[in-house]
Image: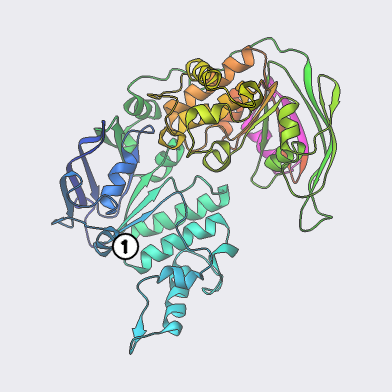
Amino acid sequence: MEKSMEKNILEMRGISKSFPGVKALDNVCLKVKYGEVHAVCGENGAGKSTLIKILSGIYPKGSFEGELIVEGRQRQFANVRESEDAGIATIYQEIELIQELSIAENIFLGRQPNRFSVIDWMKVQAEAQEALKEVGITVDSMTKIKELGVGQQQLVEIAKALQRNAKVLVLDEPTASLSEGEVEILFTIVNKLRRRGVSCIYISHRLDEVFELADRVSVLRDGQYIGTEDVADITKDKLINMMVGRELKNLFPKENFERGEIGFEVKNLTVYDAVEKNRRLVDHVSFCARYGEILGIAGLVGAGRTEMIQGLIRALPGKTTGQVYIDKKEMKINNPIDAIRCGIGYVPEDRKGAGAVLGMSIKENITLASLKKIFRMFINGSRETAEADKYVSYLQIKTPSIEQKVENLSGGNQQKVAVAKWLASESKILILDEPTRGIDVGAKQEIYELINQLTQEGLGIIMISSEMEEIMGMSDRMLVMAEGNVVGELQKEEFSQDKILRYASNITT
């Protein structure tokens, strides 16, 4: 590496940005050295996304105050293209590739090499293949993006950035949708880039990743710069304190409540694939859940956890067999509406795509699954408002108004709205699939406290989580799945990471 890590490739000085009624950034600074991985942390609403959008040219010159210095030269970006030309490449959590185009077409989109005004497709294909090699992808560069998994698509985004000679790679929550194996590949590539002198700005809520990968970490809180620390010199507790402005004594505030009767039973649940009709995604699974307990569902990616839940509420296109009992009475569930009527609420992993309707108001979202309460020939507006106000207050949803669109809320408050919808529908069993994915550590604790509160009030909670600390910290009892089967059941006193992973890997000896 020619450039010293003591020198800065990027400086953002005195950055301020306002929106109507909100100061998103207030005199924020960020310095990134050559060849370092620099994490940026903060709660939702801290200003991380706004800062990155300024750097990437989405918020152009004139729309903010402050200076951008890239390689010692003051820059002002009028658009994304100018930011890219300066060596800044930003890869967002939501994949921005064009699904119907090939890998090669995506990599060279808008920059195709040409000869005599004709695109040189042989060169496009060959150079794209070389770019893929850099990130460890062996598929043909003419493969369509839609044929790749999420992890591979993310690597294509990185290949695209490297092909454009990116000097600063910005990764925004890059592991949110990746498997453990894909995360390892991503880390390997980032470390490889670091050795080549490419700098990386790494935005993540996952503090374990920050401590494993980053050299330094900068913290934003409420739009203000709090400080920068060497990762080697800071503890997780101190970092959390910088992020939230308070000490979180117990991240998993689990209390032991008296568990009630068995309220929910599943017997011989089998879920078949919609295409390969004889293939079983879930194979004769049986389990029960008590009122007033949190039943954790653990397992590796592809174990069948989500398929099991979506199968029992009949939300999958393939054939599903088996029985569901609530209060010892068999429920006839042919579709998700039947499941709602039976008292089953389901908050899916995809909060933004399926958990809530982002373009609708908080009020409309909360009452969406319980229209029978407010509808008599027409929607009773005052009753709808009262119902929404009740749950906004109960769940402490931070909003200026119940008329606020859900898309304008933080991730933690969006999740609360998704939960409120099912409380309003008077669900007896609440199923939470990855309930804290993509939300910050302070909001996570609020969700945990809410789950405890609901448990204390007698709801039965079924919680799927891929975060080991979370599933162990919050569950009263745990089922472990592998290859579409429940392969182990553990009581609280039996929880251990080793035991869970052995079950999840289907290692019985």
Say what secondary structure mark 1 lies in: loop
- In the picture, which quadrant includes the N terminus? bottom left
**In the visual, does 100 lie left or right of 164?**
right
Q: Nearer the viewer, residue 287 or 500?
A: 287
Verify whether residue 503 appears in magenta: yes
Q: Nearer the viewer, residue 8 or 353?
A: 353
Residue bounds of the magenta highlight = 486-509
Q: Is residue 280 above or below residue 292?
A: below
Which residue is drawn at the image coordinates 45% and 79% (left, top)? 126
The answer to whether residue 509 is visible is no
Query: On the image, which quarter does residue 149 sit in?
Result: bottom right
The residue sitting at the front extreme is: 377
Q: Nearer the viewer, residue 482 or 370?
A: 370
Verify whether residue 73 appears in magenta: no
Which residue is drawn at the image coordinates 37% and 63% (left, top)? 161
Q: Tag 1: residue type?
A: Ala
The residue sitting at the bottom extreme is: 116
Query: On the image, which quarter does residue 22 sit in?
Result: top left
Q: Is residue 112 above or below residue 154?
A: below
Q: Nearer the viewer, residue 419 or 490?
A: 419
The answer to whether residue 211 is visible is yes
x then y, percent, for residue 196: 33, 62
Query: On the image, which quarter does residue 212 sit in?
Result: top left
x then y, percent, for residue 230: 29, 38
x then y, percent, for residue 348: 61, 37
Q: Which residue is mark 1?
A: 166
Q: Is residue 30 above or below residue 70?
A: above
- In the picture, which quadrant includes the C terminus? top right
**In the visual, does 92 lie left or right of 303?**
left
Q: Residues within 10 Å of mark 1 (few under 14, many from 20)?
A: many
x then y, percent, for residue 259: 71, 13
**In the visual, does 353 lie left or right of 50?**
right
